[in-house]
Amino acid sequence: MLIGERLANDDETALAECYTALSPLVRRHIAGLVPRHAVDDVVQAVFLDVWRCRHRYDTARAFEPWVLAIARKRAIDKLRAEARHYRRSAPLDDVTTAGGPTTDSTGAVDAACDVRRALAALPPPQRQALVLAHFGQLTQREIADRLAIPLGTVKARTTRGLRRMRELL
């Protein structure tokens, strides 16, 4: 009997075999979809769903594509959850100065335009690091993982970018 059929028949040992056989495939499948730090969480969620949804598996169909479809759905769920986490709660209209909320929205708009111009003047690697840090609210370690570059490179790009922003502003 195949792994998928055994799972559909509530064979718990089939889940361990399924994980051993398919986790490398699932890991490769989702590695391009989610940040590196989230891959293990997604793989765990996939095989939890494989067990929870085992009765929905149609034994007349191929098992691997069914598992990979679950993997894709869990990867999308993870990306959506991270997007909600990193999304800024304050709308652009609520831009504040150091003294508190501004009553003159023109000053806030002018400041935002100045920041955008300064960001646009930065070299792309520095701009990317600053945008991910500030707007994406990622740590330097998370930026390094996402961009697949050394942590020291992220630190250097961030420092140089901030220094250049200070000059431009």
Image (cartoon, grey):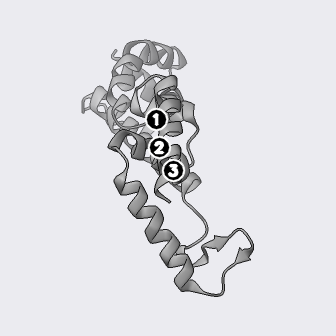
Image quarter hosting the N terminus: top left
* N-terminal-most mark, 3 or 1: 3
Left or right of 90 on screen, residue 119:
left
- The kind of residue on which mark 2 rests is Gly
* Any part of residue 35 in sight: yes
Residue 50 appears anywhere in the view: no
Report the residue that reaches farthest toward the right: 99
- 138 or 161, which lies in front? 161
| Front: mark 3 or 1 | 1
Q: Residues within 10 Å of mark 1 (few under 14, many from 20)?
A: many
* Nearest the eye: 36 or 110: 110
Q: Is residue 138 above or below residue 121?
A: above
Above or below, comparing residue 59 to residue 150 in the picture: below
Q: Which residue is mark 2?
A: 161
13 over 103 or under it: above or below: above
Q: Are marks 2 and 1 in contact (CB under 8 Å)?
A: yes
Closer to viewer: mark 2 or mark 3: 2
Q: Position of residue 21 (x, y in %)?
A: 38, 13
* Residue 101: image location, x then y, percent: 70, 78
Mark 2: secondary structure: helix
Q: Amino acid at mark 3?
A: Gly
> What percent of the width, then of the height, locates residue 166?
53, 52
**Label 1: which residue?**
157
Name the residue: 54% across, 51% down.
134
